């Protein structure tokens, strides 16, 4: 228990494995406990969220990228930061799409269940958005990053310039008085987080400072969120936190996974970090989580007003190929289509594309060859009108 300018607070801990093994009622109670803990204290710790071997597998998959990355990125001395986890590590998907985390994100972001917050859509407002179909904010994956902290990181020789901070100040708009939580953050322990190796410092209750982006929190006492490998620390974007100093001889490896409202720019552009040719292999739920979807109305459509699932996620879609959209063509109103109506013209166009593809392969221009391969595929399935 700690007392500061925001009252008396504690870092509450809940065991995910224990709740899961005890049945649905325990899982439901866990979900509500997590929301309540963040509402009161700004942080919550979920222990045994995944198995230690899941963490080891993830680190092994990311090891080549970690080893090939310099220290000191983002002003964090002695620290290596590596992203694009969805594309690079299949083991990360289990944590990125962890059911308890996603339910918590939906409660805080989608339904805005924390005290003082509310969903506000088209002039209407509803606390939590419950009881009204569709009355919630869309949200999505915001950031994926391995944070590998070496011995001495954060000391005078390798200082941390970021220090204590909030995450909600990254957007141009000032959200302090809007009554919404734009994002939540998660730090997964891929190795044990200890006092000596610099476990994350947190200012409990700092999410309740007025104004929400004030500086009083930075002068309050902190506690360190020590946790075992496979645990997850979760907090709101208004909660003040910062990396600790690693005074041990071991490396501390964590994974920062954040989620934010889908109408805000992502901190890590997931559509570039996991481009369509890789995203096509993912489960639909994960595709949608990283942003391959239309969150509302006409938002996020591609080319000829198509959802990502009907365009860039299709195997042979190419934005530079006319007719790749696959929309049905009306012979009486539409045309001419990509495929010539006359047989001779059709065969001539097909031969030309195939010849150009052969030339591109011979010239080692594989990007052009792939484009022409898609053009041939579209030609073969296009209507002849």
Image (cartoon, grey):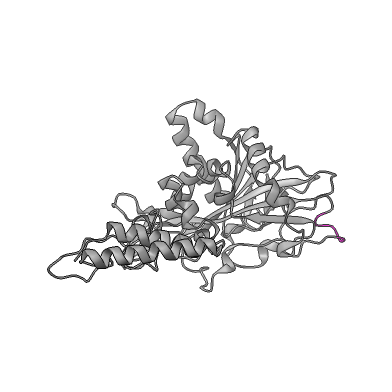
Q: Residue furthest right?
A: 157
Q: Viewed as shown, does residue 280 lie left or right of 17?
A: left
* Residue at point 19%, 66% (across, down): 385
Q: Nearer the viewer, residue 302 or 96?
A: 302
Q: Viewed as shown, does residue 314 lie left or right of 174?
A: left
Measured from the top left, where is residue 357 in percent x and y?
Answer: 45, 62
Name the image quarter holding the N terminus.
top right
* Residue at point 55%, 34% (across, down): 16
- Range drawn in magenta: 153-157
* Residue at point 40%, 55% (across, down): 313
* Residue at point 46%, 55% (across, down): 109
Measured from the top left, where is residue 202 in percent x and y?
Answer: 68, 52
Q: Is residue 385 magenta?
A: no
Residue 156 against residue 108 in the figure, above or below = below
The reply to whether residue 112 is in sight is: no
Measured from the top left, where is residue 133 in percent x and y?
Answer: 28, 52
Please tell me in which quadrant of the rendered image residue 351 appears. bottom left
Q: Nearer the viewer, residue 144 or 287?
A: 287
Residue 262 against residue 94 in the figure, above or below = below
Q: Viewed as shown, does residue 137 lie left or right of 19?
A: left
Dominant SS in magenta: loop
Q: Residue furthest top?
A: 22
Total labels drawn: 0
Measured from the top left, where is residue 147 in percent x and y?
Answer: 69, 52
Q: Residue furthest left?
A: 332
The reply to whether residue 144 is in sight is: yes
């Amino acid at each position: 228990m700690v007392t500061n300018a925001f009252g008396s607070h504690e870092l509450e801990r809940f065991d995910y494995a224990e709740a899961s093994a005890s049945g649905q009622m325990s899982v439901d109670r866990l979900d509500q406990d997590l929301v309540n803990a963040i509402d009161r204290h700004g942080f919550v710790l979920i222990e045994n969220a995944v198995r230690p071997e899941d963490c080891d597998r993830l680190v092994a998959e990311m090891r080549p990228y970690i080893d090939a990355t310099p220290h000191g990125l983002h002003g964090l001395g002695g620290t290596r930061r590596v992203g694009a986890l969805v594309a690079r590590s299949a083991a990360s998907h289990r944590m990125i799409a962890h059911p308890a985390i996603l339910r918590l994100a939906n409660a805080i972001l989608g339904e805005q269940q924390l005290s003082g917050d509310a969903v506000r859509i088209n002039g209407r407002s509803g606390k939590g958005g419950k009881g009204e179909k569709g009355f919630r904010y869309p949200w999505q994956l915001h950031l994926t990053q391995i944070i590998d902290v070496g011995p001495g990181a954060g000391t005078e020789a390798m200082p941390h310039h970021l220090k204590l901070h909030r995450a909600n100040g990254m957007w141009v708009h000032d959200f302090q008085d809007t009554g919404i939580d734009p994002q939540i953050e998660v730090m997964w322990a891929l190795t044990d987080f200890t006092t000596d190796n610099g476990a994350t410092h947190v200012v409990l209750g700092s999410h309740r400072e007025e104004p929400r982006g004030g500086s009083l929190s930075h002068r309050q006492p902190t506690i360190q969120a020590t946790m075992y490998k496979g645990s997850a620390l979760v907090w709101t974007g208004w909660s003040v936190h910062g990396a600790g100093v690693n005074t041990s001889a071991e490396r501390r490896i964590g994974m920062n996974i954040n989620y934010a409202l889908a109408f805000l720019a992502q901190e890590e552009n997931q559509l570039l970090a996991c481009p369509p040719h890789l995203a096509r292999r993912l489960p639909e739920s994960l595709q949608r989580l990283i942003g391959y979807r239309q969150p509302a109305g006409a938002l996020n459509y591609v080319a000829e007003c198509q959802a990502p699932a009907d365009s860039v996620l299709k195997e042979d879609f190419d934005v530079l190929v006319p007719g790749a959209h696959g929309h049905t063509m009306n012979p009486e109103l539409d045309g001419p289509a990509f495929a010539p109506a006359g047989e001779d013209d059709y065969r001539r166009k097909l031969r030309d594309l195939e010849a150009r593809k052969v030339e591109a392969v011979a010239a080692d221009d594989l990007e052009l060859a792939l484009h022409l391969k898609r053009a041939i595929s579209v030609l073969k399935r296009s209507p002849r009108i």
